[in-house]
Image (cartoon, rainbow, N blue to C red):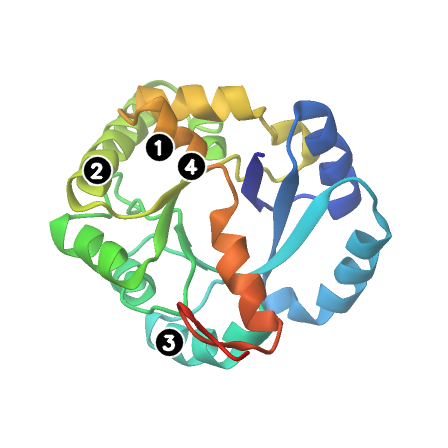
Amino acid sequence: MFYDLHIQADVEKAADIAKRLGFSGIAVAVPWANRAALGEIRAKAKALKGMDIALGIELQTRANDIPRIAKSIRRQSELILVRGGTEELNRAALETPEVDMLVSPNLQNGQCGINHILARLGAKNNVAIAFDFLEIMQSYKKTRSQLLSCWMETARFVRKYKCPFVLSSGALNEWDMRAPSELIAFGKFLGFDEKRCKRALDGGILCENRKRLGGKWVMPGVEVE
């Protein structure tokens, strides 16, 4: 079973393409600023058959606001993502246990946004770093070379400190989506073995989160009978 856990495309079109590509499920990220549309998107998702569809909230906000917002929506959200891109945002995301994934961690100046301290925080708080293939597709020449260098450095920290990670398309539309085999190949290029690449696509993050929504969850590993 394969899941693409970071899609920003229309839920109906994304579900159709995901099914053709061989995915069992997808997670559509809704920006925090557009959370009013969550109900409408959820209704569309429920009407679709043959595809497991999760909805995530992507926080694009100030670093100081991330812990407060994440805590307030944790028990109502299948997935909480944070868009990084600065040292402050990356750190706030990785030190907040209520956050599931950090996306776009690389800095605006082209440097790697993850170091040994942040990778340790991600491992400690079980916050996954998302490797979005879209960023590679949208880059070219020198920019692509710098980006790949950043991703390779991030991958080394992830492996060394056993930080969780996710391989995802980051698709803005259905044509940006990529098959599981392509994302696995991307992961192997970054230095991960096939077993870890497949685990990065298995949607395991959703399992624990959906227990939270069931009403019996107290904390990781503890549920009410």
Circle 3/circle 1 CB separation < 8 Å: no
In the shown orientation, is residue 60 left or right of residue 46?
Answer: left
* Cα–Cα gap, marks 1 and 4: 5 Å
Mark 3 or 1: the one toward you: 1
Residue 106 location in percent, x, y? 30, 44
* Cα–Cα gap, marks 3 and 2: 26 Å
Looking at marks 1 and 2 on the same chain, the residue that comes earlier in the sequence is marked by 2
Looking at marks 3 and 2 on the same chain, the residue that comes earlier in the sequence is marked by 3
Residue matched to label 3: 67
The amino acid marked with disc number 1 is: Arg
Mark 3 or 2: the one toward you: 2
Q: Which mark is residue 196?
A: 1
The amino acid marked with disc number 3 is: Pro
Q: Residue 199 carries which label?
A: 4
Residue beneath the point at 83% across and 47% down: 48
Helix, strand or loop under label 4:
helix
In the shown orientation, is residue 17 left or right of residue 169?
Answer: right
Looking at marks 3 and 4 on the same chain, the residue that comes earlier in the sequence is marked by 3
Residue matched to label 2: 159
* Cα–Cα gap, marks 4 and 2: 14 Å
**Image quarter hosting the N terminus:** top right
The amino acid marked with disc number 4 is: Arg
Helix, strand or loop under label 1:
helix
Tell me if mark 3 has few (under 14), some (14-19) or many (20+) residues whose alpha carbon lies within 10 angstroms of its own.
some
Circle 1/circle 4 CB separation < 8 Å: yes
Q: Which of 108 and 61 is in front in this view?
A: 61
Residue 32 location in percent, x, y? 57, 67
Mark 1 or 2: the one toward you: 1
* Cα–Cα gap, marks 3 and 4: 27 Å
* Cα–Cα gap, marks 3 and 1: 29 Å
Helix, strand or loop under label 3:
helix
**Image quarter hosting the C terminus:** bottom right
